Amino acid sequence: MAFIKIDRCLINSYCFSNPNNLKIWIWMLLKANFKKTFASINIGRGTATVEVNRGQFIFGRFKAEEELDMNGSLIYRALKKFEELEQIIIETNNQYSLITICNYDSYQSNNSNSEQQKNNERTMNEQGMNISKEGLEGKEGKEESNAHLKNSNLYRQPIIPNLEEVEQAFLSSGGNKEMAKIFFDKNSATGWFLKGSPIINFRNLLPSFISNFKTLSNNGTNKLTAEQKFDFYKNYSDRFD
């Protein structure tokens, strides 16, 4: 099997709104096994054999950075968002990470007839669409369901600034270009969505971001190291937004 299937619903999904997220999602589909295999993993001075089922793949940060040509922090943020949306499951131990793509069999089926039937029954949750089936089949009928969809975050798009706009906003708010770059990269990795909602006016987020960034870096007197920046992405930024 030398191909994968892409659901048409992808065009309306969360990941489609951001080029980095879309690239990572398609990369995962390409990496995932289409049948069960066994992988040999180097552990210390020895090796271990790991069962990798259909729809799963072994994830390595450095390999992902090389193949995607992306910063590791951007990849990490995208994967955590996909996990939050229940598109993937990440199982991690001290040797490796195993990623499972949810609903893989729903749209990678080899049976074309079965696939056609599933297309008619499939819920809007698949391939990143975070709308419940109940919302589409409300008691008020199809008209009310359509109105609900149009008002949902799926159809609302963020207003995405460029880096220069973000830098100017930070400078006028008491921040600096280093803060602006981290803020810009962080939100670019999530498609400029915050907790499932599109960011319409990023300037509203600056006061708390700048305040907590300064607290982390000793009131702004010291610049953050590369390790501290990654730590800020991973452990602090979600709480500060």
Image: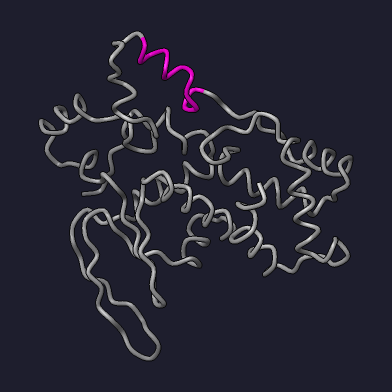
x and y percentages locating residue 186 in the rendered image: 64, 49
Magenta segment boundaries in residue numbering: 144-155
Foreground of the two, 18 or 237:
237
x and y percentages locating residue 117 in the rendered image: 14, 27
Horizontal side, residue 87 vs residue 208: left or right: left
Please tell me whether residue 190 is drawn above or below residue 229 in the rendered image.
above
- Name the image quarter holding residue 91: bottom left
Residue shown at 82%/65% (left/top)? 223
Q: Residue furthest bottom?
A: 45
Horizontal side, residue 122 vs residue 222: left or right: left
Residue shown at 75%/63% (left/top)? 216
- Name the image quarter holding residue 48: bottom left
Tally the marks.
0
Magenta span dominant secondary structure: helix
Foreground of the two, 209 or 78:
209
Residue shown at 39%/77% (left/top)? 95
Residue 106 colored in magenta in the image: no
Q: Which residue lies furthest to the top in this view?
A: 143
Please tell me whether residue 76 is drawn above or below residue 189 in the rendered image.
below
Foreground of the two, 114 or 110:
114
Horizontal side, residue 184 vs residue 110: left or right: right
x and y percentages locating residue 139 in the rendered image: 28, 15
Please tell me whether residue 32 is drawn above or below residue 166 in the rendered image.
below
